[in-house]
Each structure stands twice: as C-alpha cells, then as structure tokens.
Image: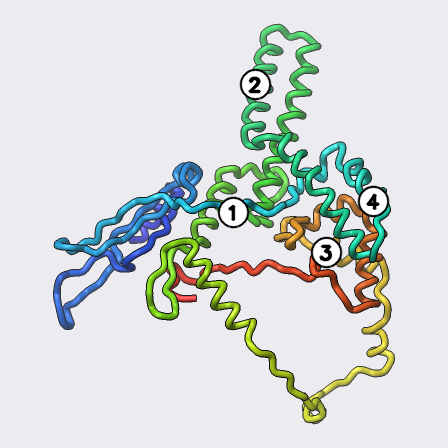
Amino acid sequence: MSEFRECISAAALVHLPFTGCYFSWHNCSDGSRSLWKRLDRVLVNEVWLTQWPLSKYFCALPSTSDHSPLILAGYTHNQIKGMFRFDNFLANQPGFHNAVWSIWRHNIHGTQMYAVVKKLKALKPIFRMQRKDMGDLSNNVQLAKRFMEQAQQLFDTYKADILLQLVKMCQVTYCQAVMQEKSMLQQRSKLNWLKDGDQCTKLFFRKINAQRARQRIYQINNSAGEMLTDSHSIVTEFVDYFQNLLGGPRVQRDLDLNFLQSSLKYTLSLDEANDLISPISHQEIKEAFFDINEDSAPGPDGYSSAFYKAAWPVIGEEVCAAVTEFFQSGTLLKQINATLLVLLPKVQLPSSV
C-alpha cells in the first residue's frame, strides 16, 4: 500500500470530487461478515483539472454487482461573475503610480472614509483594463521564451553585436514575464513559503486546481434529510441556515463584571489604561498595513495589502485620515464594514451544514 501511495504522489495524481454513495463495494455478506469499502476512485492529473476544472463523478447504487458504477460528469452551473481582485504584479508596472494619482488627485465631498471608498472604486476599471491588456500571463512566458531562444540562435550563427543586444533585451522581457506569472500564481495559490527564483509553475497550477476542487460543495442534505445536488438549492440551504442562526431575535443582558475581580491576577494602572485609548498615530496605521502579508486574501473591495504598500506615497495620508476618523467617530461606512463569509468543507463529501 505504501508503494501505491508513492506511485500516486510521484505521478502527481489527485482524487476527483464525487457525489452519491460513499462506499463503492460490498462483499454481499450479512451479519458480522458484512464489509463495506470505498475501493473504486477516480484519479486525475493537473492537465485534466486545467482542462475540466469543474468535473466530478457520481458513485451510483451497485445494482446487481458488488461494485458501484462511477459515472463521470461535468459540473455545469452558471458561474457568477467574479469580484474584483487586484493583481499584485500590477503594482510593479511603470504606469501604476500615475494611474493611482489620476484618481486620487480629485477632491470628493464627504467624510474621509467616503472619499477613500469612492476613489478605490473609481480605480477598479483602470486596473481591470490594465489586467486585460496584459493578456494570458502563462502564454506570455512561453512567447518570451521562444523569442529569447530564437535571438540566441541568431547570435550564435552571425555573432553580431546588435544581436547580442537583442538577446539581452529578450532575456529581460522573459524574466519580467516569469516574475509576473509567478506573482499571479502565488497570490492565487497562497503558497507563501516559495522564495524568489523558484520556478514551480506545475506546482502552482496543481495547488490551485486541487484546492478549488476540494473546497467545492456538490451536494448537501437539508433539515428534512433530503439530498440537494442542484447548485441553487445548495446555496438556498446555506443562506437559510445562517439567516436562522445569525438573524434570530437579539437578547440583551446586563453583565456584572465585579465577580471577576477575585480571579484577576493583574489589573491595568490608570496610565496603562489611558495608553490603550490614546489617539492612533499615522505611523501605527502604516505599520499595521505593512505588516499584512501581500498574498493574504483581500477584503470585499478586492485590494490586497500589496496595493496599499505600493500606492502609499499617493494614498497614505488620506487612508490614515480615514482610519483616524473611525477611531474618533466610532462609525464605519457599510462599504467598509462588510466581510466575506467563505464556507470551507472540513470533511470530504459533507452531508449537512
């Protein structure tokens, strides 16, 4: 069995998600001799997941056999238009600061938070267009590599100085394309441990595709025990569950904290307590932004910490003013006081919410 696992690992195969029966084999015996096993599986590689990222298989009832048939199927539900996501490699483009300044230089009437939110929203079409103009980053790498190889062949044949300059330009272009692709893949795959210079494109794609397949929910049982496989029904079941869980009647209770006094080993002095509620400096706000990992998942606005770090010379003062305004007023705009609830299955083939 260990050799079989090593073979699967060496071939870079992953399990395809499935629905239906969990066990695929029964020994057709009863009583103490009854034995259920999940012997039949479908294994695929990264080429398959890249070509059919939403595929799955259905483990049907065994009928007259002791094995359940595995029925391969595509996952065909209407994809919701993706939210805006700032690609970190755009921060290294020559026109990045000019693009930010073209929006940030305008005066917007309203609170500091409102002005920052409106300007961030106005920047999104610009970054979307820049990302579209970049094209397929993986294809760009292959094109740049072919141009570089052709230039090197010409220089090896004719030994001309002008061709040497062409080779150097192609090498620079190739390196830039590789770094852009790596930044994009690393941001999507959340592989923060990779170091500069690592060239692991297959690893990136395998990580991204396997993660997407593992986190997708294909079926769920509702409160009545009925199995739901339609994507709309699954979404409705989750929404209803959390609306009942989080949207129920609120109960306000008075809590007396004096009973904790006997258990406290240390209490803050007056100076320490005042220090906790002292005004937040702009330097502290900047340090908080710069301490966030650049590849961490962004908030609902789609901007990663890499954007704020790169654009800080332009946007830093207004962002600090907006944060300071919150600590002074104690209120947040609904555009800022929003979050994304991401449902991640903790087990394979979850049966209930």
Q: Residue at x 45, y 48 (%)?
A: 210
Q: Which residue is mark 1?
A: 80
Between 260 and 167, the one nearer to me in the picture: 260
Q: Residue at x 61, y 82 (%)?
A: 251
Q: Which residue is mark 3?
A: 291
The amino acid sitting under disc 4 is: Val
Q: Position of residue 327 (x, y in %)?
A: 81, 67
Q: Are marks 3 and 1 in contact (CB under 8 Å)?
A: no
Distance from label 2 to label 3 (Cα)?
Answer: 41 Å
Relative to residue 309, is residue 51 drawn left or right?
A: left
Q: Position of residue 121 (x, y in %)?
A: 72, 47
Of mark 2 and mark 4, the one earlier in the sequence is 2
| 147 lies above or below 61 | above
Distance from label 2 to label 4 (Cα)?
Answer: 40 Å
Of mark 4 and mark 1, the one earlier in the sequence is 1
Relative to residue 204, is residue 59 drawn left or right?
A: left
Of mark 1 and mark 2, the one earlier in the sequence is 1
Of mark 2 and mark 3, the one earlier in the sequence is 2
Q: Are marks 1 and 2 in contact (CB under 8 Å)?
A: no
Q: Which residue is mark 2?
A: 149
Q: Which residue is mark 4?
A: 314
Q: Are marks 2 and 4 in contact (CB under 8 Å)?
A: no
Q: Secondary structure at mark 2?
A: helix
Q: Judge the density around disc 1: few (<14), some (14-19), many (≥20) Cα neighbours within 10 Å.
A: few
The amino acid sitting under disc 1 is: Ile
Q: Residue at x 79, y 64 (%)?
A: 326
Q: Judge the density around disc 3: few (<14), some (14-19), many (≥20) Cα neighbours within 10 Å.
A: few
Distance from label 3 to label 1 (Cα)?
Answer: 32 Å
The reply to whether residue 318 is in sight is yes
Distance from label 4 to label 1 (Cα)?
Answer: 34 Å
